[in-house]
Image (spheres, coloured by chain):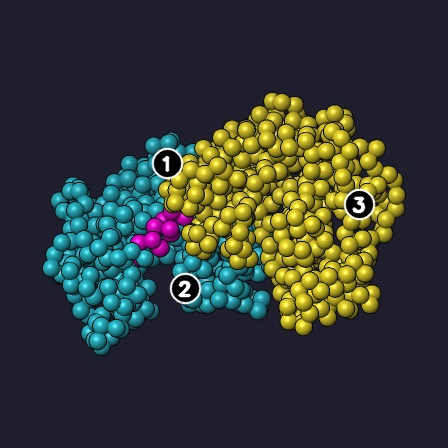
Chain colours: A cyan, B yellow
Amino acid sequence: MGEFMTETQQRPAGGRRETETRERRRPIGTQTHAGPGPLDGQEAMAILERTRGSVDPELRAAIDSLPGSMRRIALYHFGWEHADGTPAAGNAGKAIRPALVLTAAEALGGPSARKAAVRAAAAVELVHNFTLLHDDVMDRDTTRRHRPTAWTVFGDADAILAGDALQALALRLLAEDPHPASTGAAARLAACVVELCEGQHADTALEKRACADVGLDEALAMAEAKTGALLGCACALGALYAGAAGEDVEAMDAFGREAGLAFQLIDDVIGIWGDPRRTGKPAGADLAARKKSLPVVAALTSGTPAAAKLAELYEVPYGKGGMAADEETARTALAVEQAGGRDWAQVQAADRMARAMQELARAVPEPEAAGGLLALAEFVTRRST
Amino acid sequence: MGEFMTETQQRPAGGRRETETRERRRPIGTQTHAGPGPLDGQEAMAILERTRGSVDPELRAAIDSLPGSMRRIALYHFGWEHADGTPAAGNAGKAIRPALVLTAAEALGGPSARKAAVRAAAAVELVHNFTLLHDDVMDRDTTRRHRPTAWTVFGDADAILAGDALQALALRLLAEDPHPASTGAAARLAACVVELCEGQHADTALEKRACADVGLDEALAMAEAKTGALLGCACALGALYAGAAGEDVEAMDAFGREAGLAFQLIDDVIGIWGDPRRTGKPAGADLAARKKSLPVVAALTSGTPAAAKLAELYEVPYGKGGMAADEETARTALAVEQAGGRDWAQVQAADRMARAMQELARAVPEPEAAGGLLALAEFVTRRST
């Protein structure tokens, strides 16, 4: 870890309080990899693959227990069936959250804790997918994991119902799990769902508001609730299944939350400046959608001349400003950058990752035991595809 | 109980298998009351009021624990706040389900079990209200408990999110309940949510299908999943909190399910032939909406000449048949009646109530202990307002 971190003091733009923290040498999300090692993504990939191997059978069995109509929608959503019900190769996402559950359990309680936590890992993945089903309905998103979203195939009502059923299934799995940690895990996961709902509400509300009415603190709180909460909950559940002490459970939760926020910040940077050939999205897609992502909000609230320019561009729908698309995207991205939004997001992401590492070191002092979680945190914050 | 029942053999229209059962002397839903007693509704009203007294504080505390936006929608939905956030007198429904939880607990475990089950009663009421919030979005219903539905006030997205949060809150309440029955109760309630989702899906699917493609068995299965399941679950949870034996828990579940189906049958009869001055809905509202309620499906599947007439009327949207509204309603209702739909529904309701009574007698043999549950079952199946 030390090799990649250096002690420094950062003051992020946008008025967040000063924090003594560690920062990476290179901006997060832009590294090129120098040979194999725990941070080149291969270890994380291996963890994710191993996770799929243990969690998928539990997940499939849970989904197979659903009544016909709900099962069909769930199997489609997880990529295990085509819309017509024929088997598909499966593209159920990266399994980051169940991997965090299992890896946290193993870090704090060894292989037996990892094995005991498989059902909890499946429960977290079910909750994640319930929120995706509902978010896609609310946001009218038509594509998820390179396929038409469930609501476009089955209609709004059935997509909502399938989401409802997946939430119930997640909490049923935990209620039926005889492990002594399962009840505490269920309470924690249910509380997390409420936080996810609040995060999604805040996101929608933020997008509707005028540029002048958006605050950076609320944007960060929204991202924490929407993205950080479930990553934190996943780590905390792993700790609970390892029989960890209360403070270690909280440290693991904080680790996941901070890593989740770092991930969101990097994801937002990529959404503006990412290479379309690597992201699979058009350049500046988030800007075209006038999305109030974290770098944009940091820029808007910076009090700089570029902030005013950005607000002016953002108040006019994309394509209506009398500019060519490329020029409009370039100008908007430049305004965010000149207002400090890009630097702020990268410094903030580094800050969050440093905090995540501190929490991880608190809960899992032995570097070897912490290696898997570190690899996962690095993986999510570096991802650009 | 004996006074109101008589042994008889019924063969309902529509091909349901013959069942030796008991039937009321008067068709259910048409009784006039003869003086005070356990069956005049006063005992049930007292139970419901007492239930509100114990469950409302638990429910309020749970809802107050929600983050701001979700709390606001929940308080509106429960009638405790107006849309602008000012306090309202409250009209949170009749509390039938929590009353069943508490009354079942008391019937099987005495006053201490009743007291212990208050949190479970609140959880069941939260689940019921989560389904109402979502069903109203899906069905585009604009009025609930004489007020605009939540989605018409807060939008689809927030109504969906508030429903999600209420489901999570219900299961969190149980997960945080130290009572030894709480884990089994949570598993049962979560499984019930899946069944409710399937029921709502089946209902929507049924309404979309042509008259010729609708079966009576599937319509009954839909009604059981949509209405019977949660009433059954409520009774089962009460039994679990009373520490009842497994077979008594199942008997209580069956009691609630059968009473729930009886309720639905009566409700459907009222939806066609109910007195608008008592129901508050226009005469024949369900027929005008071309709703495939149970009497209608029984009529459609009766193989009678009136069935063909009814299908002909139903295939044309209401008001497009070249008849005056009153005439169209009257003709359609007559076709349902002539095809045996009304008689079938009343016999079937009586049959279901008789089965409910048998299950109740199995779980709670002492008539005095069973009195409250009997009063509630009578109340729901007689209700016409």
Residue B185: percent from left, percent from top: 58, 36
Residue A244: percent from left, percent from top: 39, 34
Secondary structure at numbered mark 1: helix
Q: CA distance from mark 2 to mark 1?
A: 35 Å
Residue with the mark numbered 2: A141
Question: Residue B8 vs residue A134: left or right?
Answer: right
Q: Is residue A206 magenta-colored?
A: yes
Residue B138: numbered disc: none
Q: Is residue B301 magenta-colored?
A: no
Compare residues A53 and B10 and report the one nearer the observer: B10
Q: CA distance from mark 3 to mark 1?
A: 60 Å
Name the residue: 38% across, 52% down.
A200
Secondary structure at numbered mark 2: loop
Residue with the mark numbered 3: B27
Q: CA distance from mark 2 to mark 3?
A: 51 Å
Residue with the mark numbered 1: A249
Indicate the quadrant containing the C terminus of chain A: top left, top right, bottom left or bottom right: bottom left
Q: Badge 1: how crowded within 10 Å, few (<14), some, or many (20+)?
A: many
Are the residues under badges 2 and 1 in a single subunit? yes
Are the residues under badges 3 and 1 in a single subunit? no
Are the residues under badges 2 and 3 in a single subunit? no
Give the label, 2 or 1, closer to the camera: 2
Give the label, 2 or 3, closer to the camera: 3
Q: Badge 3: how crowded within 10 Å, few (<14), some, or many (20+)?
A: some
Question: Residue A247 vs residue A323: left or right?
Answer: right
Say if mark 2 contacts mark 1, CB within 8 Å: no
Q: Earlier in the sequence, mark 2 or mark 1?
A: 2
